[in-house]
Image: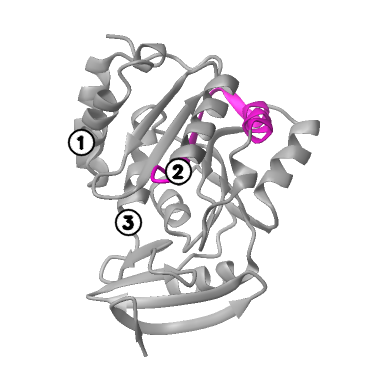
Amino acid sequence: MYKYDGLVVHQSHDDEGIIEIVETEGVRALHFGSHSRQSTMLLSDPNRLHSLYARAMMAGLLFHDSPRDVLMIGLGGGTIAKFLLHQFPECRLKVIEFRGSVLKVARSHFGLPFDSRMKIKIGCGAQHVRQHSREHSELHDLIMIDAYDHAGMAPEVSSLTFFDHCRTLLAKNGLLVINLWGTEKDLFKQVTWNMGRVFGWRILFLPVRGRGNIIGFAFGDQFPKPSMKSLIDKARHLEQQYQLEFPVFLQDIKRSNTSVINRVITK
């Protein structure tokens, strides 16, 4: 069967709806009942980040290049988790995924490994951070949020309260990275306001070229401010190391954050 301009290699249902995996010209993609791709993987190079938004989320390495204790909310095909495990041997991951069926296809069709460094919990990400922030603080140096369904961004992971709980769990010098959908203007404005208030406007945004995604970055209370010169040098180095377009990411961050960039980056 063909759908979304490709061959359907898997189709299943759970209480949240349909899960489809489609292959087109050497790329395997996860769909939740719509044309939008939730995750993509290059079949010839499965450990490489293929999706444009996933690559842009890695722009966080410009500011925090050695993640050690990562909380991920939203698994999708598991391509980001797989990248972190592959590139950072000392990294430990805690992943919260709402749908058990999504975890199954991440294992079966996207090569998500069983790894002692990664713990996966099936449940609500917002509920997880609420519960854990009552008992713990400064657990994670990196929090990554990529929680979408067929209709768009999950509202539970965009509220003021949610970001406040995330700030509690984030190390003082830690970084939060979130995948946003910029075409939903009102929701995007609200999320921006919530992030800014909670994190003292130590926030930056990276529009993903050619896509509706915008990647948001929020910085902990004691995050050290890098200079733009050091970031330019670092972007070149990271590009060679990971084959990702870090100089382009930095250029777009600089262009898109003129009003707040001095809160995060020095001249």
For numbered disc 2, what is the local secondary structure? strand
Which residue lies at the image location 44% right of the left edge and 31% below the top edge? 217
Amino acid of disc 1:
Val
Give 32 or 229, whichever is nearer the viewer. Answer: 32
Q: Which residue is mark 1?
A: 248
Vertical side of 12 occupied by 169: above or below: above
Mark 1 neighbour density, 10 Å: few (under 14) some (14–19) many (20 or more) = some
x and y percentages locating residue 9 in the rendered image: 40, 84
Vertical side of 60 occupied by 47: above or below: below
Amino acid of disc 3:
Ser
Which residue lies at the image location 68% right of the left edge and 44% below the top edge? 126
- Residue extending farthest front: 186
Which residue lies at the image location 25% right of the left edge and 41% below the top edge? 241
Q: Which residue is mark 2?
A: 180
Q: Is residue 142 magenta?
A: no
Marked residue nearer the N-terminal end (3 or 1): 3
The answer for how far apart the CA atoms under marks 2 and 1 are is 19 Å
Marked residue nearer the N-terminal end (3 or 2): 3
For numbered disc 1, what is the local secondary structure? helix
Q: Which residue is mark 3?
A: 51
The answer for how far apart the CA atoms under marks 3 and 1 are is 16 Å
x and y percentages locating residue 67 in the rendered image: 47, 36
Which residue lies at the image location 29% right of the left edge and 27% below the top edge? 256
Give 264 or 180, whichever is nearer the viewer. Answer: 180
Q: Is residue 174 magenta?
A: yes
